[in-house]
Structure formats: structure tokens, C-alpha cells
């Protein structure tokens, strides 16, 4: 029988009402999913509130929108519950989001309806982007690339190259190697990003930014890369 009382590492009961997103890695104790990779990992995390599920766009993407960098036909890869798709839609853009977690896509569709925004949400695998049947001028990636294993990364980049015409841009927000610890997705170096996009792409910039999380004091060191299809 599991202990019904939520306890901290020290064994003291958690005060009632203390924030504890369900299904998310805990700041103390053993997280249910240390490093989500497989579809069922994400499905499980969306049964509760995953740590990235802040209910608003990442600050780094809000800044891109303010700078006018999000334009044309927009695709959000691994869109989760759709905040960045809805950000693009709110700019009057044609926006598509794809994610393999059906629960996330369902929530994204609900949010679009609640906010009176038009957007296309697809339950699908980013390793098969050509199945979407479209071309995209701006691709947003908030936390997808760092989930992919090496082989999947190559397959993803092949598909991405096929749906982004020359001049199209890819904005990638990922955990950086400056983030200490092991919890969460793999850390990515600037060199790794430059190597991954050395053929058919131009890396315009890689900036150190933070990924916002549901934990007030736990933003994550990230890279924001701006990359253009050549
Ligand atoms: N972009 C969202 C979610 C980030 S978490 C946000 O910023 O809130 C990473 C997301 O990628 C999860 O929603 C997960 O379901 C999705 N994902 C992981 N591998 C995928 C794949 N192969 N195809 C489609 N989506 C994938």
C-alpha cells in the first residue's frame, strides 16, 4: 500500500496546499520519470502537470514574437499543449502544432477554443514531418530537440529539411551543458548544435537563455539557437 501522505525527503509531511505538480519530477524525492523519451513517458507526464507546463509561452519565444521573428506559416514541433502555436495564431499567422502525446493535443485544442484562436493540432511523430503535407517558414522547437536520441535526431533533421524551404527559420530552445545535474533531458553543447546544422543550414546565433518551469526558483539554463535553411 503506498504511503498516502506526500512526504519530503526528510520524511516530513508536505504542508497542505504546497505546490506539487502531479506527474512532474519532484524537487525532492524520486521523480516518476527521470528522463522522458518514449511516447508513454510523455503520455504519463501529461496525466498531471509536467515541469514545462507553465500555461504561457516561454519567455524566449515571447521575445522572438516581439522582435517580429515569428512569421509566415508556422510549425511547432513537439508542441505540447500548444502555447507557442497559440502565440503564433494570436499574431494572425497560420500555425500548426504536432505532438505524439494525444492528451497534450487535446488540451491544446481546448485552449484554442477557449481563446477563440484558429490553429491546426496534429497527433503525430516529428520523425515523419513530411506526413504533414505542408511547407513552413518558421519552425518553433521548445524542448523537443533535446529529447531525441542521436538516430532520431538525424531522422528528424532530414524531415525538417524537407518541409522548410530556403530562407525558412528554425528556433530551437534546448537544455544547455551549463545546466548542472542530471535531472531532465540530455544537455546540449553549442558545438553539437553547430555540427547538427552544418549541412543545409546556417546557424545565425546561439544565445544563453533560461527555460521557464512551473517551479518558481528553478529556471533551466538553455540555448536559444536561430538557424536558417540555406
Ligand atoms: N513544446 C512544449 C512541450 C515541450 S516537452 C512546451 O514548450 O511546452 C517535449 C514535447 O515533445 C512533449 O510534449 C512530447 O510529447 C513531445 N515529443 C517527444 N518526442 C516526440 C516525437 N518523436 N514526435 C512528436 N512529439 C514528440
Image: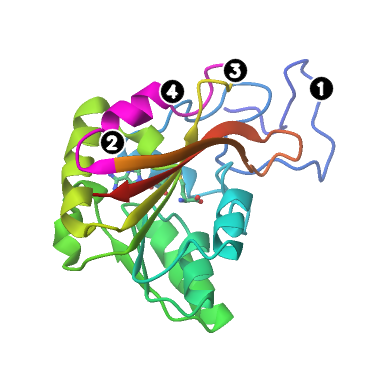
Mark 4 or 1, closer to the camera? 4
User: With 86 as the anchor, is 58 left or right in this view?
Assistant: right
Question: What is the distance, in whole Å, between disc 3 and disc 2 at their CAs?
Answer: 25 Å
> What segment carries the magenta color?
181-201
CB contact under 8 Å: marks 3 and 1: no
Give the residue at mark 2. 197
The first of marks 3 and 1 along the sequence is: 1
Question: What is the distance, in whole Å, between disc 4 and disc 1 at their CAs?
Answer: 39 Å
SS type, badge 2: loop
Q: Give residue 144's position: percent from left, percent from top.
A: 39, 42
User: With 6 as the anchor, is 196 left or right in this view?
Assistant: left
The first of marks 4 and 3 along the sequence is: 3
User: Quadrant where the N terminus lies?
Assistant: top right
Question: What is the distance, in whole Å, between disc 4 and disc 3 at their CAs?
Answer: 13 Å
Give the residue at mark 4. 189
* Circle 2 residues within 10 Å: few <14, some 14–19, many ≥20: some
Q: Check residue 48 for magenta coloring.
A: no
Amino acid at each position: 500500500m503506498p504511503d498516502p501522505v506526500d512526504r519530503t525527503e526528510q520524511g516530513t509531511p508536505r504542508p497542505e496546499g504546497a505546490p506539487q505538480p502531479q506527474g512532474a519530477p519532484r524537487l525532492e524525492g524520486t521523480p516518476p520519470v527521470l528522463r522522458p523519451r518514449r511516447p508513454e513517458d510523455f503520455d504519463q507526464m501529461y496525466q498531471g502537470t509536467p515541469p514545462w507546463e507553465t500555461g504561457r509561452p516561454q519567455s524566449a519565444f515571447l521575445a522572438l514574437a516581439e522582435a517580429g521573428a515569428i512569421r509566415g506559416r508556422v510549425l511547432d514541433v513537439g508542441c505540447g499543449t500548444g502555447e507557442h502555436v497559440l502565440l503564433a495564431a494570436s499574431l494572425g499567422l497560420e500555425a500548426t502544432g504536432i505532438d505524439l502525446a494525444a492528451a497534450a493535443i487535446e488540451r491544446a485544442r481546448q485552449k484554442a477554443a477557449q481563446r477563440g484562436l484558429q490553429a491546426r493540432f496534429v497527433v503525430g511523430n516529428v520523425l515523419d514531418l513530411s506526413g504533414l503535407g505542408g511547407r513552413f517558414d518558421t519552425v518553433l522547437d521548445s524542448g523537443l530537440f533535446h529529447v531525441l536520441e542521436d538516430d532520431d535526431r538525424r531522422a528528424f533533421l532530414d524531415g525538417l529539411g524537407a518541409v522548410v524551404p530556403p530562407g525558412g527559420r528554425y528556433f530551437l530552445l534546448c537544455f544547455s551543458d551549463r545546466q548542472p545535474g542530471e535531472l531532465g533531458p540530455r544537455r546540449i553543447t553549442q558545438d553539437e548544435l553547430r555540427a547538427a546544422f552544418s549541412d543545409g543550414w546556417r546557424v545565425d546565433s546561439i544565445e544563453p537563455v533560461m527555460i521557464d518551469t512551473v517551479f518558481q526558483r528553478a529556471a533551466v539554463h538553455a540555448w536559444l539557437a536561430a538557424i536558417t535553411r540555406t
